[in-house]
Amino acid sequence: MTRSATSPNPAKPNLGMNAIGLLLAAGTLFLLLPLAPFIAAIWLVDKLRGD
């Protein structure tokens, strides 16, 4: 028997938190996708310079 104020409930998916996570991921992708060519160009220049 556990010493808890609330009774344990079985694990079930939390749709609200899942929706928030998907919205955050979509927002991050929406913001970072236009920056991808610049990030790739900086990475490529760094690799070619060999520093």
Image (tube, rainbow, N blue to C red):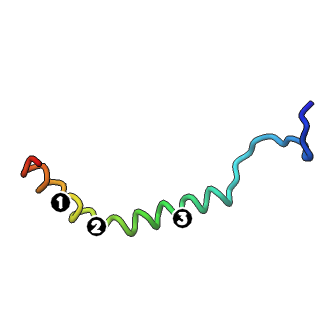
Q: Left or right of 30: which side holds 35?
A: left
Quarter of the image with the N terminus in it? top right
Q: Quadrant of residue 37 in the image? A: bottom left
Q: Are marks 3 and 1 in contact (CB under 8 Å)?
A: no
Residue 11 to residue 21: above or below = above
Q: Residue 3: give x, y in percent of width and height.
A: 91, 37
Q: Quadrant of residue 30 in the image? A: bottom left
Q: Residue 45: give x, y in percent of width and height.
A: 11, 56
Residue 8 to residue 17: above or below = above
Name the mark nearer the viewer: 3 or 1: 1
Q: Left or right of 49: which side holds 35?
A: right
Q: Residue 35: give x, y in percent of width and height.
A: 28, 67
Return the mark for residue 31: none
Residue bearing mark 3:
23
Please rate how many residues cluster around mark 3, counting C-alpha atoms within 10 Å: few if below 14, some from 14 to 19, many from 20.
few
Q: Left or right of 23: which side holds 2?
A: right
Q: Mark 3 and mark 2: span between their CA atoms?
A: 19 Å
In depth, the one of 28 and 19 nearer the eye is: 28
Q: Residue 21: give x, y in percent of width and height.
A: 57, 58
Residue bearing mark 2:
35
Q: SS for tag 1?
A: helix
Q: How many marks?
A: 3
Q: Quadrant of residue 22 in the image? A: bottom right
Q: SS for tag 3?
A: helix
Residue bearing mark 1:
42
Please rate how many residues cluster around mark 2, counting C-alpha atoms within 10 Å: few if below 14, some from 14 to 19, many from 20.
few
